[in-house]
Image: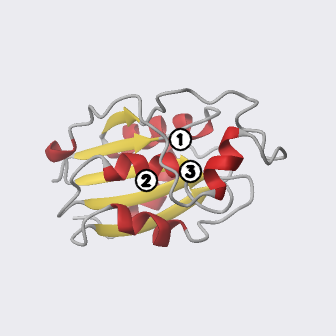
Amino acid sequence: MSKKLVAFFSASGSTRKLANTLAQVVGADVYEIKPATPYTGKDLNWNDSQSRSSVEMADKNSRPALNDTDAKISEYDTIFVGFPIWWYVAPHIVNSFLESYDFAGKTIVLFATSGGSGFGETLAQLKPSCAASVKWIQGKVFRGRADKNILSDWIKTLPLD
């Protein structure tokens, strides 16, 4: 049995709730990906092309600074990485996280929250942030609440271990 970690970025709390429930379902440790400077409501205003999140997402090379790099990635075999979908992809802080650690030989399972968007080009944009030996599983985008039963059913469909 592999040791699992649920690492997540959550701007509004929705992904945090999902990540914590997922960690309970799979028996995983939890690590929150935090920006060095927390996002405010104004920063997240997607209607404002000058808001922090809009500016970051317009630049594919943007890598927001992390609050810390204390995740003990070497201790885990499978890492679930969760985030909200922003502009049809993962927020660039997820790239910052992936580029801060050695994921060689690990399995990364993506999961996301969104009100209506799918994964879009997320996997293609995240892959270059890790070693070629990473086993990627695109996972699922969750809309609204996902209880333990929904997550348990989803986990059974994944090619883990």
Q: Which residue is mark 3?
A: 91
Compared to residue 115, the image places residue 45 above or below, namely: above
Q: Where 56 falls versus 38 (above or below)?
A: below
Q: Residue 78: image x %, image y %? A: 26, 54
* Residue 95 position within the rendered picture, expressed as x and y whole percent measured from the top left: 43, 53
> How far apart are labels 1 and 2 at the CA level?
20 Å
Q: Residue at x 44, y 37 (%)?
A: 65
Does 57 sit left or right of 79 as displayed?
Answer: right
Kindly state the secondary structure of the residue where label 1 is placed: helix
Q: How is the image coloured?
A: secondary structure
First in sequence: mark 1 vs mark 3: 1
Marks 1 and 3: which is nearer the front? 3
Q: Which mark is residue 18?
A: 1
Viewer can see residue 101 = yes
Residue at 50%, 58% (x, y): give it. 61
At label 1, which amino acid type do we have?
Leu
Label 3 SS: loop
Q: Which residue is mark 2?
A: 95
Q: Nearer the viewer, residue 52 or 126?
A: 52
How far separated are the C-alphas under marks 3 and 2?
8 Å
